[in-house]
Image: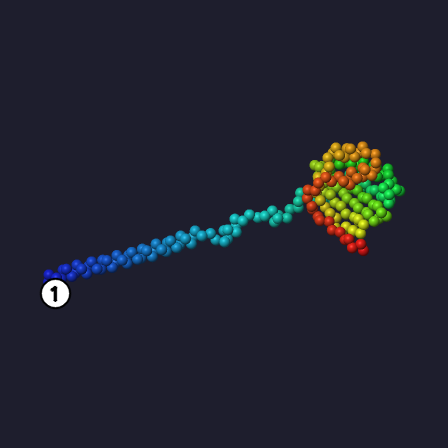
Amino acid sequence: MLTTRALPGLACALSLLLACTDKGDDTTEGTSSESQTTDGETTDSQPTDAQTTEDEPATDGETGTPAPGCECAEGDPCSVQLCETASLFEDEGEDTGGQDEASLAASLTCALEALRDRKVGRIGWRQESGAGQYDEYGHFEMFGDGTARYTTGGVADICTTIVDAVEVVTLRSPETFAACLEDAAIEERFACLRQARLALQTTCVEGEHDCSGV
């Protein structure tokens, strides 16, 4: 039988046991709360796919802007005809049989002077030989800075142009054309005009040809 003296000791023991139990529950709840906070912070710091995509720069190809020099619309200064087309009609030999040499000489002088003086506008050439087996043409739309939009096409043996080739080219130096103007041979002066192109800058249109011979 418990004595009256033993009751205070038992009450004290029960009080200590209850206090320890409450303290353990508080520790567990605190740990759980800290775990939830840590998980939330980890999730918020991760980048989303949408954020990554927005940082990617657009490419130049999306603009669709034509390459510089590839356009010379009707009415633009580069499209204005400066001279008559220099047309050379050849027989099987190397002479200029049967054509108006005075007219050809005048058109060549005009075109070569325009090239020498870096004028803005259009000049052209045409050459036919072999009784029409070869009938080629070209024209320069000049920008006045030593460059031009150069278009070529025609018939060469069994090949016929379907789509004219268009390029942006660098022209030869003014001194080259000045020397050409002093050449007395009309064929040499014509070659100076036809070969006015020094170097390719840009291909605007790939030429297409039909070589079926039909």
Q: How is the image coloured?
A: rainbow
The quadrant holding residue 176 is top right
Q: How many labels does the image show?
A: 1
Residue pointed to by mark 1? 2
Q: Quadrant of the C terminus?
A: bottom right
The quadrant holding residue 16 is bottom left
Q: Residue at left 43%, top 51%?
A: 45
Residue nearest the viewer, comparing 51 with 186: 186
| Residue at the limit of the structure toward the front, as seen here | 93
Q: Horizontal placement of 82 versus 65: left or right?
A: right
Q: Horizontal placement of 64 versus 194: left or right?
A: left
Where in the figure is residue 202, as x and y percent of width and height? 68, 44
Relative to 22, say whether 138 is above or below: above
Q: Residue at left 77%, top 44%?
A: 138
Q: Residues within 10 Å of mark 1 (few under 14, many from 20)?
A: few
Q: Which amino acid does label 1 sit on?
A: Leu
Where in the figure is residue 58, as x and y percent of width and height? 57, 48
